[in-house]
Amino acid sequence: MDDLLETSDIDALRRLAIVAWERAESLSQEKAQAVEERTVALQQKREVQAKLDAVLTENETLLARIGELVLKLARATDRDTQLELELELQVLRERLANSNDQIYGSRSERRPKGDKKPKRKKKQQGHGPTPQPRLPIQTVTHTLDEGCACEGCGGDLRELAEQFETSELISSVRRSFVLKEVKRHKYACNGCGTIRTAPGPLRLIPGGRYDLGFAVQIALDKYLDAMPLERQLRKMSRVGLKITSQTLWDQTHALYLLLLPTFIALQARVRAEPVLHIDETRWRQMGKVKGSRSKTWWLWVLTGSTGVVFDLQPTRGSEAAKLLLQGFSGVLVADGYSVYSSLEKAFSRFGEQLPLDGHALKQPDFTLAMCWMHARRGFIKAQKKGAIQANEPLDLIGELYSIEAQAKELAGGDPQALLEHRRRLREDRSRQLISTLQLWCETQRVLPGTQLHQAIQFVRARWTSLKVFLEDPRVPLDNGEAERQIRGPVIGRKNYYGTRSERGARVASLMFSLLQSCIVLGVEPFEYLMEAATSARNAPGTVYLPHQHPTISSQEPSTA
């Protein structure tokens, strides 16, 4: 008995030691993560302060130079010298205004409505309960306690059949985790004695401890709701689950491997569309990547009507754009970035092949459609700097957008009708507006180097691309769709700063692509990822795209 007690005590001490060691390891990881987050935040703060100091220094230099020019202009008697000094003075004042806008200016590009008094909105008297068609309904019936009597006369109460007073109550169900003890029955053959075991539940990693739903929820929390793994750990810990960030990452990476064939198929499907939008933004690479010295990577997005493709690349150059656009031969809606225009000019329909690891990739051969939102931006800046001439092109561009809104309203949600109304209205009205705007840009005489001059030159250099929408009703006026799709990952970039490795960048590209494609197509992301992962787990290599989900598989989205 004494020996048994001693053994029990030793086992208990051993378990306590293991728990203490795991807790110490978890605290060590949390501390390391906190130190790294503080380091990154401090570095970002230093970068912002350095930019601010540079802008303030530039302001001081510009103010000193402007003072010198004002004195020289006052003393100058020669007309040519006066004109030269006035030109330099105006350019420097615009530079100073742009510099101040970076610090104090508004980011809005909304134009004032003029002298018209805004209509006073009627005070809203309440909107009533918001319909909740997607929430499951749980009926709860409340009854009186037994023996309750009438409050008026004290008589017995009789229950009225099927008579209720009904109301709604929205309740929150707390997220929880369950440790399931899986028992698989064994069977023996009466004839030969062969043993057979009942199949168990599907696991993400064979022999692992976590199911598919666990990994899918981790991916959704991070790549759709921008919640870093360490923050997920804290939420899990509060409801009793003890786990490490490495385990969460392992589950996410295993899910990535299952869905990789689907991601490749999604890329091919999106590139086959006739009209695509493209954009790019900075992305921080915090770990060391072989062959890349820069900590600044670039997140590229390619979006169409049937899906969205993201790609993280270490460069913003033409090679990265070629890889993203390989084989695309439709209309590409983009901003004024020079890489897109250079790629459009570089290759013919049967153009060159780009060698990559011994393979030849079909080169992109697209028609570039310039974004009118970016063309408008230069005139907005000029107007803010006091150039009243910019009001005319802004009014003309505003009319273009009004025509597009009218076509959408007339279509009433019908994609084919939208194309017809766009074709008719653009031919009847938009083409004349473009001719008027082009004539205005050609006839204006403005000082070189000013903001208005830069805006006019920007538009004049891109007339061919800006007029593509007149010939193809499928092409929208601007590249707003790509900018909207990239907002979600940008929020994630702010929350978890970036990625730690090239492998992490690949996982992020896949998850962003599949999840944002679900959002575009109106598919519930959790349901889709569960179905795609289950199919791939049962039959490795299975491709299950978001548009195949039952909610929309019966109606293919239009390319309009």
Image (cartoon, grey):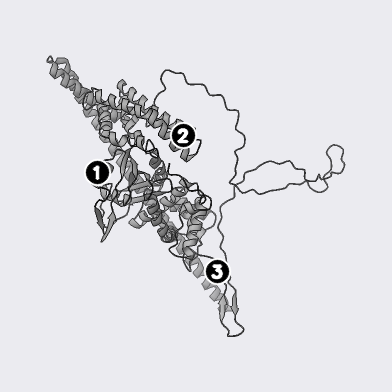
At which x and y percent is residue 187? 60, 78
Q: Is residue 199 left or right of residue 484?
A: right
Residue pictured at 34% horizontal, 45% vertical: 330
Q: Amino acid at mark 1?
A: Lys
* Residue at the disc numbered 1: 345
Up the image or down, 306 lies above or below 91; here it is below
At which x and y percent is residue 274? 37, 46
State how far apart marks 1 and 2 are (Cα).
33 Å
Residue pictured at 64% horizontal, 48% vertical: 137
State how far apart marks 1 and 3 are (Cα).
58 Å
State how far apart marks 2 and 3 are (Cα).
53 Å
Image quarter in which the C terminus is found: top left
In terms of image quadrants, where is residue 389?
Answer: top left
* Residue at the disc numbered 3: 200
Rate crowding at label 1 as few (under 14), some (14 to 19) or many (20 or more) other CA atoms within 10 Å: few
Q: Amino acid at mark 3?
A: Gly
Question: Which SS class for mark 1?
Answer: helix
Question: Mark 3 or mark 1, which is nearer the start of the sequence?
Answer: 3
Image quarter in which the N terminus is found: bottom right
Question: Which SS class for mark 3?
Answer: loop
Q: Is residue 125 left or right of residue 485?
A: right
Up the image or down, 14 lies above or below 525; here it is below
Rate crowding at label 3 as few (under 14), some (14 to 19) or many (20 or more) other CA atoms within 10 Å: few
- In this rendering, the label closer to the viewer, 1 or 3: 1
Tell me whether circle 2 and circle 3 mark residues in contact (CB < 8 Å). no
Q: Is residue 111 left or right of residue 445?
A: right
Marker disc for residue 408: 2
At which x and y percent is residue 95? 25, 28
Question: Which SS class for mark 2?
Answer: helix
Rate crowding at label 2 as few (under 14), some (14 to 19) or many (20 or more) other CA atoms within 10 Å: some
